[in-house]
Image (cartoon, grey):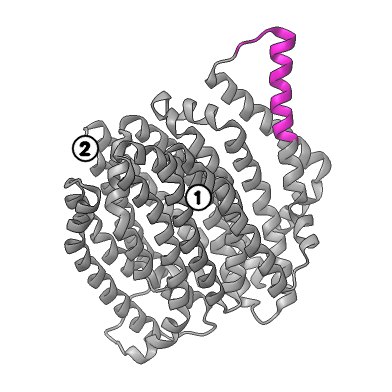
């Protein structure tokens, strides 16, 4: 079986299972948000301020190195596993003394026990590095999808029970811990792999040389993602940070839930073609087009109809989060395009380029956010809606020059998604005006939300079927090949 065929078949399973998992995950998330207070999300964000950075760096990019390396032995895998465990134990131990300065920074001692609980995630995550990435390397996405569903269901049921029992912030951290424990246990079973009692640091060095750049860029991205929350929590309070953090989490859902579907398939596939630049770019643009047909309309709905979405899904108590949700949707739309570019650089063996981008973001964005926060809480939307998209556009231009992808070729790949998005937005507003002018209807926020979703879906399906039927044929051909 050809590589593309194997990737497509396993990717189809993973996509279907992930969609099923994500729909239920979103439903659980919205239900739990109704039970918890904004302050609970704020406390969770504060407790994760330092530990979130450490968690990204603790993996040291070893997983990406396993996938990118062409050939790998059982001895090398065992050495990587035990090294990863040692690193996880080290970072777990670091969490205990860090809990106290974190509580001092945010002036809230409730953060200390939450940070203690978070520390266990380092050991759990380190144990998953090898089996998870072995499955990725061999396109075992069907097994990964099933494992994600099992982990999601168990953790969300626990969170619902804890939220109804009034456990507050402990609802969130307990759910994350159970999700990770379930996932790592099933990963070992699915990979049919266990480490041998073998370790030499010499065998780990090649993985570290590649992975340290991946870990460096990932950790720096997490630094700038954490610094904005630090600034908001320090200058304002847990309640306002809760609005800010929840809006960011909600806006991140499409990329957090949909991007991994493409990332899991595309990274090992592009890594196989790392020596064939033309074929690599061709596959990249094809998958980008499919991704854009999903992500661009979703974020456009958030940008233009964010008020209806938030008030319908989570209720009026989250109204202050609406402008932030819209601004984050703008930022995440451009960031999703950057993720594709980052993947292209990394799969070709150049993670240091992504590290440079991470350094630029880490320096630029926190300064802009601090300046905006000193002006007012509402001004925090400006850096995300203006500065961040500018950085992303500059990175895409650089990527085109390095990879020899013509800008017009890229624009052609996303022209269809942009056209259908414009049709959806105009159609939704046009339908509303017709209903108000012609029939005098006065719709509630919930009715406006339903109207937007229904109209958008009809227009999207109509456009693809009538004007871009080639996309359907190509997609069917890929997954039936």
Q: Which residues are magenta?
A: 423-442
Residue 32 image point, x, y percent? 35, 35
Judge by depth and name the residue closer to the eye, 474 or 9. 474
Question: Secondary structure under badge 2?
Answer: loop
Instruction: Decide: is 230 above or below 302.
Output: below
* SS of the residue under disc 1: helix
Q: Is residue 197 left or right of residue 388?
A: left
Give x and y (percent) for residue 98. 21, 61
Where is residue 387 shown, x and y percent of the image? 57, 52
- Reading the image, the residue beneath label 2 is 167
Residue 73 in the figure: left or right of residue 160: right
Q: What residue appears at the point 53 percent right and 48 percent down from the top-left corner?
A: 384
Mark 1 highlights which residue?
257
Please tell me whether the stretch drawn in magenta is mainly helix, strand or loop: helix
Give me the residue at 21% from left, 32% from top.
Answer: 165
Question: In the image shown, does 79 or 445 lie closer to the viewer?
Answer: 445
Q: Residue furthest bottom?
A: 202
- Is 39 drawn above or below residue 208 in the view shown? above
Q: Is residue 183 left or right of residue 448?
A: left
Query: Which residue is rendered at x = 74% and y = 73% of the image?
Result: 404
Res 300 quadrant in image = top right
Is residue 436 in the magenta section? yes
């Amino acid at each position: 079986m050809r590589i593309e065929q194997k990737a497509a078949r396993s990717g189809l399973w993973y996509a279907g299972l992930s969609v099923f998992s994500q729909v239920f995950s979103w439903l659980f998330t919205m239900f739990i948000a109704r039970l918890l207070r904004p302050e609970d999300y704020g406390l969770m964000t504060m407790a994760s301020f330092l530990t979130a950075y450490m968690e990204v760096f603790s993996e040291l990019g070893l997983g990406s190195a396993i996938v990118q390396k062409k050939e790998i032995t059982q001895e090398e895998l065992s050495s990587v596993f035990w090294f990863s465990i040692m690193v996880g134990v080290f970072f777990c131990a670091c969490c205990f003394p860090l809990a106290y300065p974190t509580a001092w920074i945010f002036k809230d001692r409730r953060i200390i026990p939450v940070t203690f609980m978070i520390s266990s995630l380092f050991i759990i995550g380190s144990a998953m590095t090898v089996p998870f990435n072995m499955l990725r390397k061999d396109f075992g996405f069907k097994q990964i999808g099933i494992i994600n569903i099992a982990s999601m269901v168990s953790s969300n049921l626990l969170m619902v029970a804890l939220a109804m029992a009034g456990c507050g912030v402990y609802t969130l951290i307990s759910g994350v811990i159970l999700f990770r424990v379930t996932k790592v246990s099933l990963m070992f079973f699915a990979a049919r792999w266990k480490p041998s009692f073998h370790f030499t640091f010499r065998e780990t060095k090649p993985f570290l040389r590649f992975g340290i750049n991946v870990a460096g860029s990932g950790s720096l991205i997490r630094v700038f993602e954490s610094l904005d929350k630090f600034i908001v929590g320090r200058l304002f309070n847990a309640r306002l940070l809760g609005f800010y953090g929840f809006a960011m989490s909600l806006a991140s859902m499409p990329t957090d839930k949909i991007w991994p579907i493409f990332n899991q398939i595309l990274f090992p596939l592009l890594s196989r073609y790392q020596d064939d630049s033309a074929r690599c770019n061709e596959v990249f643009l094809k998958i980008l087009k499919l991704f854009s047909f999903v992500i661009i309309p979703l974020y456009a709905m958030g940008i233009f109809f964010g008020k209806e979405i938030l008030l319908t899904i989570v209720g009026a108590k989250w109204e202050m989060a609406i402008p932030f949700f819209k601004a984050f949707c703008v930022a995440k739309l451009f960031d999703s395009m950057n993720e594709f570019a980052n993947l292209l650089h990394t799969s070709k063996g150049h993670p240091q380029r992504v590290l440079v981008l991470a350094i630029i973001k880490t320096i630029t964005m926190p300064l802009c956010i601090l300046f905006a926060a000193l002006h007012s809480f509402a001004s925090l939307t400006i850096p995300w809606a203006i500065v961040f998209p500018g950085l992303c556009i500059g990175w895409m231009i650089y990527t085109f020059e390095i990879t020899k992808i013509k800008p017009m070729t890229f624009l052609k790949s996303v022209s269809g998604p942009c056209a259908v998005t414009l049709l959806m937005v105009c159609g939704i507003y046009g339908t509303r005006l017709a209903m108000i002018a012609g029939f005098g209807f006065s719709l509630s926020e919930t009715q406006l939300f339903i109207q937007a979703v229904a109209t958008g879906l009809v227009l999207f399906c109509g456009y693809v079927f009538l004007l871009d039927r080639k996309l359907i044929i190509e997609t069917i051909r890929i997954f039936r090949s």
